[in-house]
Image: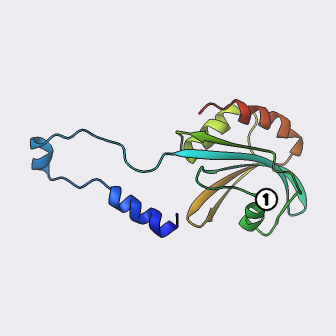
Amino acid sequence: MSDTDLIRKIEENKPKTETKEELHTSPKTLTATGQNIGAGITLTRVYFDSRLQASVFIYPASYMLTQERIESLDPRFKTIPRELGIQREIKDITPEDLSKRFLNEIRPLHSDIDRFYTTNGIRISENVFNNPHTSLYLSTIIKDIKG
């Protein structure tokens, strides 16, 4: 589905704005509309400016993160062939809420750098860990995150 089709579908599903009188005289059952929410989380080791790091990317579930897409986010990225690490999709959560949950779960560890990218209208966050050996700990946390 193209971005234009998605925007059109969202516009069609927007609830009609009701006047104050309509709200008081015709109660309606509220129903959810729109797409299912979900978020993807990927842990991988990559080179950024020739320095090895562990990176955790969080993005909408509708986006498929690949090595090529990681390299397209910033020309300073260089992925390791066949190294995508762990990739999960968690349903019924927004990327923002997943990011908060992930950062809460890894305490007392914290990311060294947080970066944000936008590609094709999709926001992708990256949490950078300069010590790539934290990957084992991070992979355990990511496997255990509940949806």
> Image point 56% across, 39% down: which residue?
91
In this view, 1 is above or below 139 = below
Give the amino acid at mark 1. Answer: Gln
The reply, left or right, for residue 22 in relation to residue 49 is left
| Secondary structure state at the residue bearing disc 1 | helix
Image quarter (top left, top right, bottom left or bottom right) of the C terminus: top right
Which residue is disc 1 drawn over? 67
Across and down, in percent, residue 73 comes to 72, 65
What colouring method underlies this structural image? Answer: rainbow
Q: Position of residue 146 (x, y in %)?
A: 62, 30
| Residue under the image location 33 percent in, 60 percent down | 12
Q: In which image quadrant can residue 68 be found?
A: bottom right
Vertical order, 90 against 54 (above or below): above
Of residues 44 and 47, the one drawn nearer to the viewer in this rendering? 44
Judging depth in this view, the residue of 64 and 124 nearest the camera is: 64
For this orientation, the residue located farthest to the front is 1
Where residue 131 sits in the image (x, y, percent)?
87, 45
Q: Is residue 72 left or right of residue 16?
A: right
| Relative height, residue 70 to residue 92 (above, below) | below
**Camera sees residue 141:** yes
Classify mark 1: residues with Cα within 10 Å, few (<14), some (14-19) or many (20+): some
Q: Report the front residue among 76 and 29.
A: 29
How many numbered marks does the figure carry? 1
Q: Is residue 107 visible?
A: no
Where in the figure is residue 78, as x and y percent of width and height? 85, 63
Q: Residue at x 67, y 55 (%)?
A: 64
